[in-house]
Amino acid sequence: MACSLLGPSFLMCKKFCPLSHFPCRPSLPPPMAALRSSPTSQHCCRCASNSNPNQPSLLVFSGGTAFNGVVEELKSFTTRVAHVLPVSDDGGSTAEIVRVLGGPAVGDIRSRCLRLSDQSTAEALAVRRLLGHRLTLDAQEAKSEWYNIVEGEHFLWNGVSKPYRETIRAFLAYFQNQILRRSDESFCFSNGSIGNFFFAGARIFFQSLDAAIFLFSRVSDIPSESMVLPVISTNDRLTLGCELWDGTIIRGQNEISHPTYGSMEPINKGRSSVPALPSRIKRVFYMSSEGSNLLYEVFPTANPAVLEQLSSVDCIVYAMGSLFTSNCPSLVLLGIGEIISSRSCHKVLLLNGTNDRETSDFSASCFVTAITDALNRTYGDSQNCLKNLPSQYINTLLVPKDGEIPVDVQCLAAQGIFDVINVDSIHDPIVGVIFDPKSLIQALADVVGKHMSANVTELNYHSNIVQGPE
């Protein structure tokens, strides 16, 4: 069955990257002719032609959950956004993919890509529904449903045109083929994400995470000016670790934030679903996933594309969410702190509305300290640590009204942060107080707009001094 499905050609990639750059796969012809003839592929051109170079450019550090709720509203302000996400998520179906096939975790990236995907046509919605689908929790039922999807007989294929159907099925079948080749491992499809399976199939085929993101972005028709960037561009498995102030070492992102104790059930991210940590987190770092010494610290390099974007965007945003497992894994990498501290742009922290397992009893200034320590690599390699001040990394806080995290204004002022803005909030029954999306994006737009206007005024002032009076 698998071999019969591995037939679509992908010539679209020739336009962007020679096929010689990709590993040889005799059973698969060159990729992506299907997308060229697809009726919806014209939307990629529409997005490119309608992109507004006058829109402000943002770079957002976030995880794959909390910021997703405002992504749609953010499009009304700007689509020139670089979404930087970690590749260390090890929960749910991502954990099963990594266990059997290895490679980086793609769950957060897949989640953001789906949020950014086109919804303007019936087919776009059908593709989004398919790639966003999760299989049932029952392992046998999930496996049966998976085979139904791979064979093209599931109702989720309704509304997906033949070119897109062939393209998506090819990589789902390739993913299945890779699982079957690991005969010593039994893959569990329980609660599996079809988008994650597609993503993993593409990554293994191309032997490139960046190429898989490119393909997923085209299939889900993400605006061409929006970027989804893994903070580390790798084809290897990465494991996040943390050190507590009492000396305890915890291995694995989910063990740090939302321990599941081996369960495949959906992760409950409710505020009281897990016990508090025995001590505060001192630092996060990357750990070896190979060999016998699994507590060995490693130092991966930051994605050059992230460093490039950091050097040029109009605003840098630290999104709300899990502080130590969503934001800090991106901030501790060499080069990130150096560039951010050198920039004069606005640097905005979106404060959480409630504390979680990672930030129990934190105040606003504690969040600032944690971000500063991560960017300075204060408790990491002593040869590569920085001594920058908090105000070099953050100059504005957006705070949800009625939030439960104390905003200690005097401590923030001592850190050099004076711009604290309250934003309307709403109450979520699961996670508590969160930003009202529309109010948050409006507040962010106001902050960025004022900063850009001030820069224009300053440039005009200096230009007049140089030119002199007429």
Image (tube, rainbow, N blue to C red):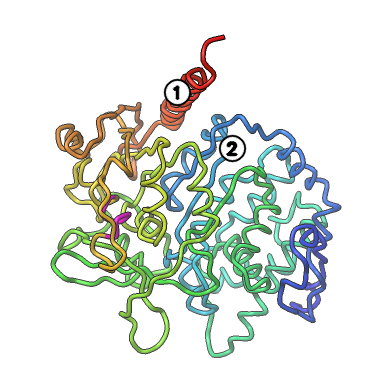
Which segment is the magenta one? 372-377
State the residue in front, 404 or 126. Answer: 404
Q: Examine the structure image and report whether residue 49 is included in the region drawn in magenta.
A: no
Q: Amino acid at mark 1?
A: Glu
Label 1 vs 2, first from the N-terminus: 2
The location of residue 67, given as percent across then percent down, is 44, 44
Q: Which mark is residue 358?
A: none
Q: Amino acid at mark 2?
A: Thr
* Residue at x-position 16% and y-position 70%: 247
Q: Examine the structure image and report whether residue 376 is included in the region drawn in magenta.
A: yes
**Residue 5, image quadrant:** bottom right
* Residue at x-position 77% and y-position 56%: 164
Q: Secondary structure at mark 1?
A: helix
- Residue 407 against residue 91 in the figure, above or below: above
Residue occupied by mark 1: 458
State the residue in front, 136 or 219. Answer: 219
* Residue at x-position 78% and y-position 45%: 40
- Residue 344 against residue 221 in the figure, above or below: above
State the residue in front, 187 or 347. Answer: 347
Give the residue furthest to the top.
470
Residue occupied by mark 2: 79
- Residue 342 against residue 216 in the figure, above or below: above
